[in-house]
Structures are given as C-alpha cells and as structure tokens.
Amino acid sequence: MISRLTLFRLCLILLVSAAPSRAAALRLACVGDSITAGYALKDPARDAYPAQLARLLGPDYEVRNFGVSAATLMDAGNYTYRTRPAHDEALAWGPDVVVIALGTNDTKAENIAAHPDDFMPSYRGLIARFRAANPAVKILVCLPPPAFPVAMGIAERVLVAEILPRIRQVATEQQLPLIDLHSPLLNAAALFPDRIHPNPEGAARIAQLVYGGLMLAIQPSAKSLDPAIDTAVVPVP
C-alpha cells in the first residue's frame, strides 16, 4: 500500500511537472553614448535610463547598458562606437531587442562636417550587424535629446539640420520604429544640468519615452504609462 507521504510526493511532482514554465526574459540592449551610459550621474547603475527602463519593464525583460561615453555612430567619427568593446559585447549577447540612441557626438565639427557621407552607411552597418547576430531581432532607433543650445562641441542647430533628418531616413528605409527623444524634451533644459546629459529625472523621462516606444512597437495592445508618451513614437509608413 502506498503511504500518504509517498502519495503526497507523487502529487507534488505531478503538479510541478504540469505547471507552465515561465518564458525566458527578452534580452534588450541599450546601445548609445554617454547619455545612455549615465555620464554625470552619481549612480548610473541605478539612475541611467537603461536601469530605469528595466524597472518599468519588469521581469519579462533583461536590460543591459551598452552605452559608451563620447561614442559616435559614424565609423569615420573621432571615437566610433564600432571599435569600442561594448559594440562587440552587445553583438555577442545576441539581443532580442536593440534600442539605438546615437548621433549626439556626431554633431561635432570633426565628425559630420568632415565626413557627411559616412553617417548613413555607418547606421545601416550597425543595424545589419545586429540582424546578423539575431535574425529575429527587433530594432528601434532614437532621435537624440536636444542640446541646450551648444555645449561640449555639440550644437543643437547641427543636430537638427544634419543628424535628425538622417536618422529619420534610416528608420524609414529600414522600416524601423523611431522614438523621438528630441521634441518631447525641447522645453526640459532643467533636466540637463550641463546642457547635454540628463539628471536622474531627465533619465527617467527618457526611460518613459523609450518604454512607450517599446510598448507600441512590440506590444501594440499594451497601454503606455502616460498617453503623452505615444506622441513620441513615429510610426513607420
């Protein structure tokens, strides 16, 4: 005769084996420059926008910060992201989702003015490398936050005239969702103490905008935290 203890154990095993297994968390890579890395923040591991985004997304996502201070999107830039260790680490991770927020440092005179034809092929190349690492990857591209108005060699007028149109063009031709971190923050200079890098509150706002873009792009039926966030995402035609 089977003892009650043995019967209990058998029932427990059956219950555990029948329970649905939890899906693995989606791997989300935040690729960017010092704004992504959390430059000027006292605790980037807690306050940089990728860390705050991770808290918004919860356990369904594993978010990693691959930001590199001073990095350019352009391969011909003075400090190109392509040759930084974070670039190779992000590719090796094979993320399911990639959020690219580069372009701020490309505004410097030695970059876009000196190599105006390099930005587009460099962006296409970065996208292609992530697609090669994971053919099913979902990529979102961001318009950089404003510069207020010139700081550290970064000029808002160059950002608006030279960088933003190119990023929009890449998003359209590659059929990628575009998250606008520029327009919603034009009147938020107080959140960028050195006129380029966000404080914790500014990083939180960026995280909210990226969160809204992700929800609309990946989970269209999900609601954003704030209805205003929806306006920051430019749908691809």
Image (tube, rainbow, N blue to C red):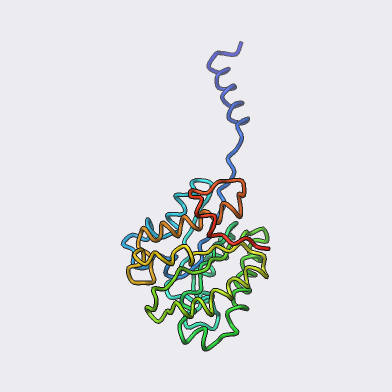
Image quarter hosting the C terminus:
bottom right
Residue 205: x and y in percent read 43, 58
* Residue at image point 52% right, 68% down: 143
Q: In this view, does 159 lie above or below 235?
A: below
- Nearer to me, 94 or 167: 167
Horizontal side of residue 101 vs 133, given as left or right: left
Which residue is farthest top? 1
Q: Which residue is drawn at 49% across and 66% down?
A: 183
66 vs 188, nearest the viewer = 188
- The answer to whether residue 124 is above or below residue 110 is above
Q: Where is residue 200 in the image (x, y as percent from the top left)?
A: 36, 59
| Residue at (49% x, 48% y) in the render | 225
- Image quadrant holding the N terminus, namely top right
Residue 222 spot, x, y in % from top left = 58, 46
Which is nearer the eye, 98 or 132? 98
Picture coordinates of residue 55 (x, y %)?
Answer: 44, 49
Which residue is found at the position 60% from the left and 13% from the top? 2
> Which quadrant of the figure has residue 82?
bottom right
Q: How many marks?
A: 0
